[in-house]
Image (cartoon, rainbow, N blue to C red):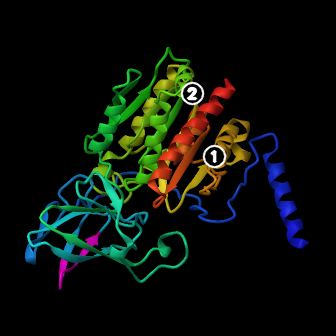
Amino acid sequence: MKTQLLAILILFSVIISCKNTATVVPQKSTSGYQGQGVSPVVPTVNRPVQKQWKGIWSMENQTYFSNDFDGARLNGVAEDGNDHYTIWITAENTPINVSPWYSFKVWTGKPREITIKLSYQDSRSRYYPKISSDGIHFKVLDSTNYKVINPGEGEFGIKAAPEFAEITLTIGNEPVWISAQELYTSKRVQEWVDSLSVKPFITNYEIGKSHENRAIQLMEIKEYPSTKKALMIISRQHPPEVTGFLVMKSFMETISSDTEQAKTFREKFDIFAVPLMNPDGVDNGHWRHNMGGIDLNRDWENFNQPETRSVRDFLNKKNEEGYEFVFGADFHSTWDDIYYPIDSTVIGQKGKIVYDWIESISTRLPQKRTNIAPSDKIKPTMVSRNYFYVHHGMPAIVFELGDNTPRDFLKEKGKVAAEEIMRLLLEKE
């Protein structure tokens, strides 16, 4: 009886807090991944970055390891004997979020089976290995070839990850790629953007430069004379967060598709997207930061980094042109799927569409629960979601996808997310 009474009181408090604001949704998830706490305020002025040495390690028995390609991360190799090797993975600088990205090639002149131990600087083995024969098409390593050493504790977070992992491979003359996640370098992302840009209503152009002079590329979907209503989409502020990129990719493909819904939507709304916010970090195989040594998603207050300044200046220009931004999303990855909206008590009726969107996606995809962790802290803006709302008035969300969420589900989730935001915005017209 006491349990029932407590449940009624909790439900009543949620209803009162949401009254006359947003759709009633749980303000905190009750199970599964609960998300991270409030992000600390950190300095965003440049910090030194240690660039990794690039080249080929030549071992006995004609075995070779290489990090000489974009997106690679391999900092050292030791031969332990009996076809066993230990590789070392270190971060670009510290302190840093524990996202220990790795990517390397291995091959041999004497085909055989080898074992590789993955070890890290101040981290544990977060990412389950992906394997490829061409560096483009990856699959999850067979579990029979994967061994954990010193298993972690709990269900989520770095403490739940094993301290080390060993992988067993049969290698030959042709290189095999081993990577924490699929490789989507700046070149490959641009190829995808270019493939969509063959459609007459999609253009892409540079809005700024990174530290290493890579383009900050913007994709623009504009099919009709503009109504000056737009969406702003960004992705990949953090290099290893490939699953968020994959959902964003499906999201953009759906909005630019030939369905009647998409065609109608493009009559009313323009869509702007920066698919790759951190091209330097991605191509240099960083765990988290840009080449300024900074977490870009802490720089939306001071704008010390050229990547965030590029988007800020673009949005300010569009505001001067009379644009109203009606929705913003920043796609990320973490331990499991989770939404980070602005709390309904802060954003009120303006944010109702975000909560309606979450609810509608959950209704269509009930097979995988996505937790919700609203934040009532919007100043200092610091993170993109807060900046989008405080300075540009757009209902915005950080949309995080799990590191290990199945790839076919990621594609479906991006498609459903696009269809539901199109439906909701069109219904408001």
- The residue to which callout 2 is attached is 261
Circles 2, 1 touching at the beta carbon (< 8 Å): no
x then y, percent, for residue 308:
42, 41
Residue 82 is inside the magenta segment: yes
- The residue to which callout 1 is attached is 364
- The kind of residue on which mark 1 rests is Arg
**Would you say 287 lies left or right of 379 here?**
left
- The kind of residue on which mark 2 rests is Gln
Q: Determine the residue positioned at 53% across, 69% down.
A: 156
| First to last magenta residue range | 78-89
Q: Determine the residue positioned at 61% across, 50% down.
A: 365
x then y, percent, for residue 307:
38, 42
- Whether residue 318 is visible to the viewer of this picture, yes or no, is yes
x then y, percent, for residue 105:
21, 62
Which SS class for mark 1?
helix
- Residue 238 is tagged as none
Q: Main structural element of the magenta stretch: helix, strand or loop?
A: strand
Residue 86 is inside the magenta segment: yes
Q: Earlier in the sequence, mark 2 or mark 1?
A: 2
- As displayed, is residue 8 above or below residue 108? above
